[in-house]
Amino acid sequence: MARLHAAAFAPERGWHPEEFAALLAQPFTQMHSTPEGFALARSLAGESELLTLAVDPARQGRGVGAALVARWLETIGTDTAFLEVAADNAAAIALYERSGFLEAGRRRAYYSRPDSAPVDAIIMKRDLTKGNTG
Ligand SMILES: CC(C)(COP(=O)(O)OP(=O)(O)OC[C@H]1O[C@@H](n2cnc3c(N)ncnc32)[C@H](O)[C@@H]1OP(=O)(O)O)[C@@H](O)C(=O)NCCC(=O)NCCS
């Protein structure tokens, strides 16, 4: 997971194996994976947060990310799903919009960038209550 995550997020720092181990040891963490990628989420008190989503760079653009998000949404059983995404991550934002997420807020200048000004974090939400699951 750490290797794939580092490759997907390069040149940013990937998460360490110990960080994945600690998250996976927590009772509220769910993982969905294929050989090409994985999604990690945490579900608690009626809400589920997508903690990270990574697809092998050599396998991107083939529907893996969309399938992982769909699997997360199908299995969580909570009323709301949310996530944070960097405002300059056009591919991920497009995926989440196609998956029914809407912008719900912003954290200004949240992600630092080595060669440019910090970038906002966009908080995106999807209501999963009855009648809004399509
Ligand atoms: C974001 C990421 C998970 C997408 O995974 P993927 O398997 O390549 O995505 P999919 O092939 O399932 O594409 C699903 C939709 O996402 C959008 N999308 C994916 N790649 C895109 C790109 N390069 N540019 C624009 N839109 C893109 C499209 O809307 C696409 O639907 P379409 O193919 O019908 O147009 C992948 O690019 C990745 O791992 N990126 C690095 C890590 C990252 O940014 N994770 C998310 C952090 S919040």
Image (spheres, helix red, strand yellow):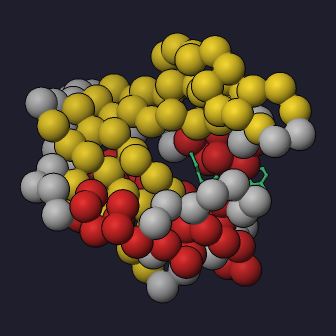
State left or right for residue 69 relative to residue 48. Answer: right
Residue 33 in which image quadrant: bottom left
* The one of 19 and 51 positioned closer to us in this rendering: 19
Residue 36 visible from this viewpoint: yes
**Which quadrant of the render holds ligand 1?**
bottom right
- Check the image and name the residue furthest to the bottom: 35
The quadrant of the picture occupied by the C terminus is top left
| Total tally of numbered discs in the picture | 0
Please provide percent x and percent y for residue 57: 71, 73
Q: Percent x, y for residue 7?
A: 66, 72
Q: Is residue 32 left or right of residue 38?
A: left
Task: Give percent across and percent down for residue 86.
Answer: 65, 35
Q: Residue furthest right?
A: 115
Query: In the image shown, does 48 or 66 lie closer to the viewer?
Result: 48
Towards the viewer: 109 or 130:
109
Where is residue 59? Give x, y as percent.
Answer: 67, 78
Residue at image coords 51%, 34%: 84
Quarter of image, res 18: bottom left
Q: Is residue 63 visible?
A: no
Q: Residue at x 51, y 25 (%)?
A: 123
